[in-house]
C-alpha cells in the first residue's frame, strides 16, 4: 500500500493496470486481493475519473486522497467505435445498398458479430451510415440496406397482410403457368 500511495503522490490519476505496473504489484493482487477496495474504504484513494475505451467499457482512474468518487459516465452507442465498425464504413463507401450479411462478407467480419454487437445501429446513430432502402425477403421481415454517410433513414415497410401475400402468390402462379407449358414444348422440340 505504501508503494501505491507513493506512486499516486507523484503521478495521478492512474488506472489499476498502470498502478500495478509502476508500483510493482501484480494486477491480480491489486484488484483481486482487495487492495484498491480497502484503500478506498480507508479514504486513502478515490476514483478521480474514468477512461473511455473503444469497446464501450470504462476504466477507473485512481488518485490519492479522500473525497467523493467521480461518477461513472454513461456510455452510449454514439460513443462506440472499433476496427470492425471502421471496416463496415469502408465497405459501404465502395458498395452502397448492402444488407448486413453482404457487408459481413465484404468486410471479413462474422455476420453474427455485426447483427448481435449492435454495430449497424451504432453507426446509424453516429450518422456514419444510413438505411437507404429495404429488401423484402420471401419469408420473414424485410432486411435493411445500408449506404455510406448521413442521410434520411427509410422507414421499415409494413409487413404484408395475408390477403396481399395470397394475391402475389396467385399472380406469380398465373404469370408462370403459360411459360411452363411453352418451356416444356421448347425442350421437346430441342430433344427431337
Image (spheres, rainbow, N blue to C red):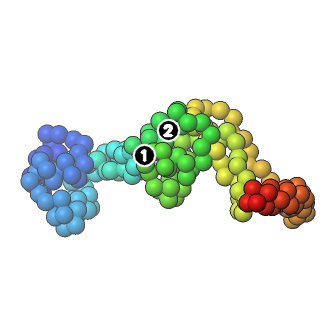
Expressed as whole percent of the image width and height from the top left, the position of residue 161 reads 86, 61
Q: Is residue 148 left or right of residue 63?
A: right
Does residue 65 appear anywhere in the picture? no
User: Dot 1, how many residues are within 10 Å of its Cα: few (below 14), some (14-19), or many (20+)?
Assistant: some
User: Helix or strand or loop: what does disc 2 sit on?
Assistant: helix
Q: Is residue 130 left or right of residue 122?
A: right
Looking at the image, is 95 positioned above or below residue 184? above
Q: Distance between the residues labelled 1 and 2?
A: 11 Å
User: Dot 2, how many residues are within 10 Å of its Cα: few (below 14), some (14-19), or many (20+)?
Assistant: many
- The residue indicated by pointer 1 is 84
| Discs 1/2, front | 2
Could you tell me which quadrant the C terminus lies in?
bottom right
Question: Please, which residue is most extreme toward the bottom here?
Answer: 33
Q: Which of 116 and 88 is in front in this view?
A: 88
Expressed as whole percent of the image width and height from the top left, the position of residue 67 reads 31, 49
Q: Quadrant of residue 29?
A: bottom left
- The residue indicated by pointer 2 is 91
Q: Which of 86 and 167 is in front in this view?
A: 167
Q: In this view, does 55 lie to the left or right of 95?
A: left
Q: Nearer the viewer, residue 92 or 185?
A: 185
User: Helix or strand or loop: what does disc 1 sit on?
Assistant: helix
Q: Which residue is drawn at 64% across and 44% down?
A: 145
Amino acid at each position: 500500500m505504501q508503494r501505491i500511495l507513493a506512486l499516486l503522490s507523484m503521478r495521478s490519476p492512474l488506472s489499476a493496470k498502470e498502478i500495478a505496473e509502476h508500483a510493482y504489484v501484480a494486477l491480480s493482487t491489486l484488484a483481486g486481493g482487495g487492495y484498491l477496495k480497502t484503500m478506498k474504504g480507508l479514504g486513502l484513494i478515490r476514483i478521480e475519473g474514468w477512461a473511455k475505451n473503444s469497446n464501450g467499457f470504462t476504466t477507473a482512474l485512481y488518485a490519492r486522497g479522500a473525497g467523493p468518487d467521480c461518477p461513472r459516465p454513461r456510455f452510449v452507442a454514439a460513443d462506440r467505435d472499433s476496427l470492425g465498425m471502421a471496416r463496415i464504413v469502408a465497405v459501404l463507401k465502395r458498395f452502397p445498398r448492402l444488407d448486413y450479411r453482404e457487408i459481413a462478407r465484404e468486410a471479413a467480419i462474422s455476420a453474427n458479430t455485426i447483427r448481435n454487437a449492435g454495430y449497424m445501429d451504432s453507426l446509424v446513430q453516429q450518422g456514419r451510415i444510413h438505411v437507404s432502402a429495404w429488401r423484402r425477403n420471401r419469408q420473414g421481415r424485410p432486411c435493411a440496406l445500408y449506404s455510406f454517410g448521413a442521410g434520411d433513414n427509410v422507414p421499415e415497410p409494413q409487413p404484408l397482410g395475408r390477403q396481399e401475400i395470397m394475391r402475389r402468390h396467385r399472380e406469380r402462379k398465373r404469370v408462370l403457368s403459360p411459360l411452363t407449358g411453352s418451356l416444356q414444348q421448347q425442350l421437346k422440340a430441342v430433344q427431337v
